[in-house]
Image (cartoon, rainbow, N blue to C red):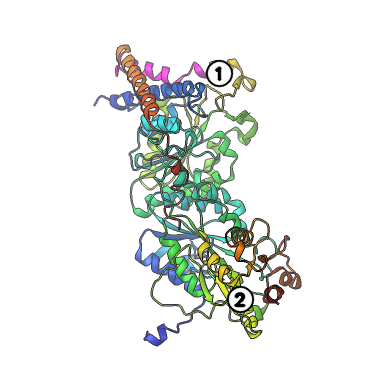
Amino acid sequence: MTQSQENSRQITYVQAVNEAIEYEMANDPDVFIMGEDIAGGAGRADLGKQDAWGGVFRLTKGLIGKFGEDRVRDTPISEAGFIGAGVGAAATGMRPIVDLMFVGFFGVCGDQIVNNAAKMHYMFGGKVKIPITIITSTGAGTASAAQHSETLYSVFTHFPGLKCVSPSDPYTAKGLMTAAIRDDDPVIVFNHKLLMGRTVKPEMGKGIGFGSIVPENSYEIPIGKALVPVEGNDITLIGISYTTLVCKEAAVELQKKGYSVEVIDLLSLSPMDNETIIKSVMKTRNVVIVDEDYPRCSIASDISALVAEEAFDYLDSPPIRITAPHTLVPYSLPLEMEYLPSKEKVIEAAISILE
Amino acid sequence: MAKSKETGIDKQTALWMYQTMTTTRMFEAECRRQADQGKLRGMHSSIGQEAVPTGICAHLKDGDQILGTHRSHHHCIAKGVNLNEMMAELLGKSTGTNKGKGGTMHIADINKGMLGANGVVGSNIPVAVGAALTSKLKGSQNVSVVFFGDGAVGQGVLYESMNLASIWKLPVIFVCENNRYAEATPFEYSMAGQSVAKRAPGFDMPGINVDGQSVVEMYNASKVAIQKARNGEGPTLIEAMTYRYQGHFGADPPLTYRTEEEEALYKSKDCIDRMKSYLIDMGFSDEEEISGMDEKANIAVAESVKFADESPFPNLEELHTEVYVKYE
């Protein structure tokens, strides 16, 4: 690849995650991955295919051909069983990646995540490490209704012992996935379904999951650090995962109206980059937090409290939270679109402050 | 080495098993005294169940991992966890196995192959499957053994774990210590079919029912299971029928849900009394040597209390450390 190609290489979010996993598996024999249909069709060698699916989002497509069935391991539908097995493998020297297909399924395996993965290092006096990476899909916008469309970041961020990251594009997806696999603590990587190219509303999906330059070589984005993709002076918009895209689109419109907008791409939810948030708000004196999660006890609430406690004297206006409403994710298209934070809602909120 | 023709157990192993069980019982009795003094903050006594882990751990090496339950002092001692560090942990001292951060339900020493007690019923079972998966992926001969009570038989994760271990042919031994009561609920009430061993064949693994109050029976049953696991022939489920002499936890009066007759029946089949007779019958030992082993246990337990008493509590900064390997 030439220098100019390297500087402009665009791949999908899914390809970016796949590259990160492939590189780590190729370079560390302790890394392996397991989950439901991550190869797909295991046991049907007679069909002559490497993998039927490569995961429901194709994140692991092709890996079984490169690394074999031992290290790319289809599981039964037993989330508590295989995530618990991931914890045990991590405790005894492996670096497992486990796929929790949809974040809402944490309901059947929460014990393994919050009581074992999160707690063993502390509970055992620091003598056991649990370097497990849990990847999971989040987000509304795919007509999947209440059980397959949540984000639930705050649930996991609540627990000491877990790290949580939420990439916003292919570049951050590859860098955070790499960092998560190499991290010695349990890390949950939340991959938004819209960023992975799933949508029932074509215009919403168009271009999503592209648009960032992704180096071919391996790199890490440090866990615990936010990025500031748009710099400005009048207002700070804080996005998480898909809502970073919403913030960037809102910023373009607001800039056309003459406002100088700063966008923070939070990326890490635990640990959270408080410093970047406070520094930005002290500069812009206004903040809108855009979080797709339920509003109660959310990351948005947490940031709002942080800003109120640590930058109160700098604020020109109260922090505004744009979140999902305190309701469930609906199926019907107009209802689902109303549910999601949108560019329009962000612009309206920003203008209400700035005008 | 002299070996019993009847049981295949050599003298050294037989003496180790007696020593382990008598040490465990004295340790647990001392824990109760420490609790009564208010120094040890809560425990679940394993008295009566000493034979179960002892017979199994006689076959294990440091690299083999065991995983326990909320009632796990006997597992720890059988796997060779240091008594001083255990008592220090129970008294919340910085020199404890877990630096005072775990306590009775979380004692762990991975270097000794004790991958942790666990306070959530059934929670450790898939973790054992993962330890066995490591063994398979790394090509070691290590096995993992997970102990759980009859109460855990009601947890779905047991069956997910048995299935995973079976389809992947992992070196796991599932050991149900059926002490007849999940807290106060008898297994006759809660367990359809009255047997967990009978459930194993459905997962294409052997399920065997063993007298868990006989360390000799435990030794022999687990010998086969562990050898199979090491040979890559997959998991086994052992249902060890046993009895906890005390209540579920310190202040629990068990006669509210069981009878004196039942308690007397099980105590008449006490694992330590029977092992004492076995040692003498086999000519492995005599009354005097056995008394010496009891005294040795007594001294070791007393030393553990002294060590724990003389150890400092953790610094208050320890509240915040080791939540993560790194967090910034």
Mainly helix, strand or loop, the magenta region? Answer: helix
Residue lying farthest front?
A: A313
Quadrant of the rendering where the C terminus of chain B is positioned: bottom left
**Mark 2 and 1 residues: CB-CB less than 8 Å, in contact?**
no
The span picked out in magenta is B265-286
Q: Name the image quarter holding residue B108.
A: top left
Number of marks in picture? 2
Residue A314 visible, this angle: yes
Q: Amino acid at mark 2?
A: Asp
Residue B298 place in picture, x, y as percent: 36, 19
What chain does badge 1 belong to?
B
Label 1 residue SS: helix
Mark 2 Cα shell of 10 Å, populated few (<14), some (14-19), many (≥20): many
User: Which residue lies under the disc numbered 2?
Assistant: A234
Residue B299 place in picture, x, y as percent: 34, 20
Q: From the viewer's perspective, is A38 left or right of A338? A: left
